[in-house]
Structure formats: structure tokens, C-alpha cells
Amino acid sequence: MTSDTGARTALHLLLVWALMAVAVPVLGMALLVSAWAAGNGALVPVLAVGVPLSLVLLFAAAAPVRTVVPLCASAPKRLGWAALVFVLGTLGVLAGLAVYDEGVSLGSTDTRIALTGAPYAVAAAFFVPNRRVRLGATAALVAAVAYGGFIGPGQARQHRHTAEVARYREHQELLCTIDTPSGMRATRSPTRIWRA
């Protein structure tokens, strides 16, 4: 890879990341607001506008590497490339949302917004015909899976445990248990007793 090709590839991946880091949160907020205001039926028009716009942005981001990435050599191929990157990147964003929903810390709001562009840049990197770029994309993918699947959930469990211990230290009366009346059972919440 020459320095010119390397610079164009870096610009290409940076463009993919930056454009998607802006477009995906905007699309997500539009989906959230429309579903909240008008129900799930309002999601269709938002997606009908948002997805093609995202594809146009990705199509534009492929311009610097027309001669480097074979899938970006012509307009129809660039459109196919944009669709592949969009689908793969969106799967990455959905996996990140699932991990975040499980309590795994993904940093501040700004960090989470910046991270939304990363799956698209990693997906785009896999189409660059350069071994080092693909190895970098593989390393990023492995790191994300390791953090989201193993390290992050372990840290989240530890944080929940620490918070629970701190809560019991602050309110020691919660540690006292009582015999439950006949036909009742105590749950983990010390203030509730449920009928069996």
C-alpha cells in the first residue's frame, strides 16, 4: 500500500465513521420520537427516509477509494458496498445496544455517540484489500466482542454487587429478616412480601 493509497483509505474509514456517528444517532432519535408520539406505525416513514439517506452518506464516503476497494469501483458496486456496510454496521450497533441494555458501561453520552460509527468503519475496513487494515478491523471486532460478551458483563455484575453491599451498609435494618406468614414468601426486595 503506497502512502497515497494509505491516506485515501484512512480518509475513507474516517469518513465512514464520522458520517455514521452523526447519522445513526439522529435516525435513532427520530425513530424514538416518532414511535413515542405516534406509535409504531410512524416508524415506517422514518425508516423509509432515514435508511436511504444513510446509504447516500455511505455511498459518498466510498468516493476516495474508488481505485482502492474493488467493490467501490463503479456506482452500482458502491451502492452494493454501501448496503453491505449499512447492514453489517447496524448489526454491530444493535449488538452494542443489547450489551448496553444489560448494564455494560459504554462510557459517557459523547463516547456512546462516537461509538455508533465504529461498527460501520470496521465493516468498511473488511472490504479494503489490505492485510494490515483487515487485521486491524479483526482486532477491533475481537476487542468489542471480548468487552461486550465477557469483560463488560463481569464489570456490570461487580458494580451491581458493590452497589447492593453499599445499600445494605447504609441501611443495615434491611439485613433483618422476618418469618413470613403462612401462604406468603419473601422476595429479594426487603420491603415486599408476595402471596404464594
Image (cartoon, rainbow, N blue to C red):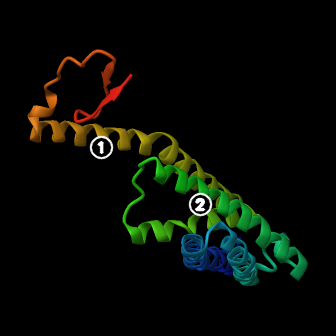
Q: Which mark is residue 159?
A: 1
- Residue at the spot x=57%, y=65% of the render? 118
| Left or right of residue 107, residue 96 in this image | right
Specify whether residue 95 is in view: yes
Three-letter amino acid code at the position of disc 1:
His
- Give the Cα separation between the discs numbered 2 and 1: 24 Å
Q: Position of residue 100 (x, y in %)?
A: 47, 53
How many neighbours does mark 1 have within 10 angstroms: few (below 14), some (14-19), or many (20 or more)? Answer: some
| Left or right of residue 97, residue 44 in this image | right
- Residue at the spot x=83%, y=76% of the render? 79
Three-letter amino acid code at the position of disc 2:
Val
Foreground residue, 122 or 179? Answer: 179
Q: Secondary structure at mark 1?
A: helix
**Residue 96, picture quadrant:** bottom right
Q: Which mark is residue 55?
A: none
Q: Which residue is mark 2?
A: 93
- Residue at the spot x=31%, y=38% of the render? 158
| Left or right of residue 154, residue 186 in this image | left
In this view, 93 is above or below 156: below
Q: Position of residue 172 (x, y in %)?
A: 9, 34
